[in-house]
Image: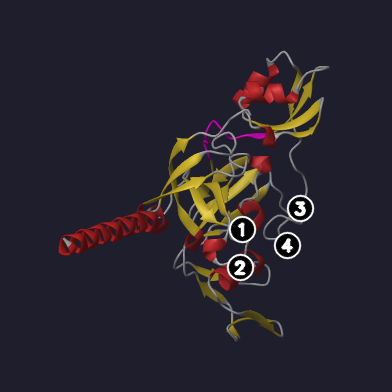
Amino acid sequence: MSFLRRHWQNDWLRAFALAVGVLLVLHLFVVRFINVQSTSMTATLWPGDLLLVARWPKWTGLDHGDIVVFRDPVEDHAGMSQRSLLVKRVMAVPGDELEIRRGVVYVNGKRVREAEGISYSYLVRLRPAASAEALLHRLGLPLEVSHGVEPNIELPLSMQLADLARKDSAVESVEPMTLARGARSHIFPFSPRYPWNGDDYGPITVPGTGDTLRITVDNLPLYDRVISTYEGHRLGAAGNELTIDDRPLEEYAVEQDYYFVLGDSRHYSADSRYWGFLPASHVVGRVSHVLVSGDRGR
């Protein structure tokens, strides 16, 4: 009996170890599950949505329009596995030139045909005694997206939702918020040489593996994090010359691919406009399916 018991225990342990190994392989290389925390992808993804994330695009590459999960590129104080997970949409891939003109995205000179869920800021004026919470519920929007104080609230709305809000009996008017104008100091690459804002941005070219960049004092703000933070080189200056690892820096060969990502809620998203290129090394995977939808309009 003791022999049979040991044999059964050994079989159970082997089966358990095999199951753990299979789950680990699936987690690392095939799929994983992510819960949406922010409102930056409203109305495509919502707080509370449970996502199935395909892992293999981390190695095979991403394409235009993919929704990507990645580790926060600016949490430099934390190890990669401890960084926050973010979700955005890929707008430009290595070699692309991206530009935003009055809120409209162009890639390689062509206007991007974007998903229906793309939203922008609207000022919604409510009628007397109307409830903002009730309006949000009817529009299917989470409470977290509302800003301001009744009767004037600011909401991220797609064109379809804006039209629906205008027809609501609680609403007096719905008007798009004024687009940003002039240079903004908090916009990447944080240099007066690039007087951009969130609605007028670029043109900017996304670097990729093997690209040779000619580095100057003028364009260094675009690439300093690529060279130093993401690819681990030491930048400096010797007199009027830039240096890399104590050698003169005139050209730089990029060591990995990068992407330019935006949130679908354009005026409520901290994305590549605010921190720069997304390194491929920070990518977790591509969103494949929404498995469980969050409590919308709560």
Mark 3 or mark 2, whichever is nearer to me: 2
Left or right position of 229 against 167: left
Kindly report the distance in space between the C-alpha atoms of the residues bearing marks 2 and 4. 14 Å
Residue at image position (75%, 43%) is 180
Characterize the local packing of mark 1: few (<14), some (14-19) or many (20 or more) Cα atoms within 10 angstroms: many
Residue at image position (55%, 68%) is 230
Left or right position of 171 against 10: right
Left or right position of 224 against 6: right
Extent of the magenta region: 112-120
Do the CB atoms of the residues marked 1 and 2 lie less than 8 Å apart? Answer: yes
The amino acid sitting under disc 2 is Arg
Mark 4 or mark 1, whichever is nearer to me: 1
Kindly report the distance in space between the C-alpha atoms of the residues bearing marks 3 and 1. 14 Å
Element type where label 2 sits in the image: helix
Q: Is residue 240 above or below residue 90?
A: below
Give the image location of residue 287, x and y in percent.
45, 44
Residue placed under numbered mark 3 in the picture: 184
- Examine the image and state in which quarter residue 209 appears: bottom left
Q: Quadrant of the C terminus?
A: top right
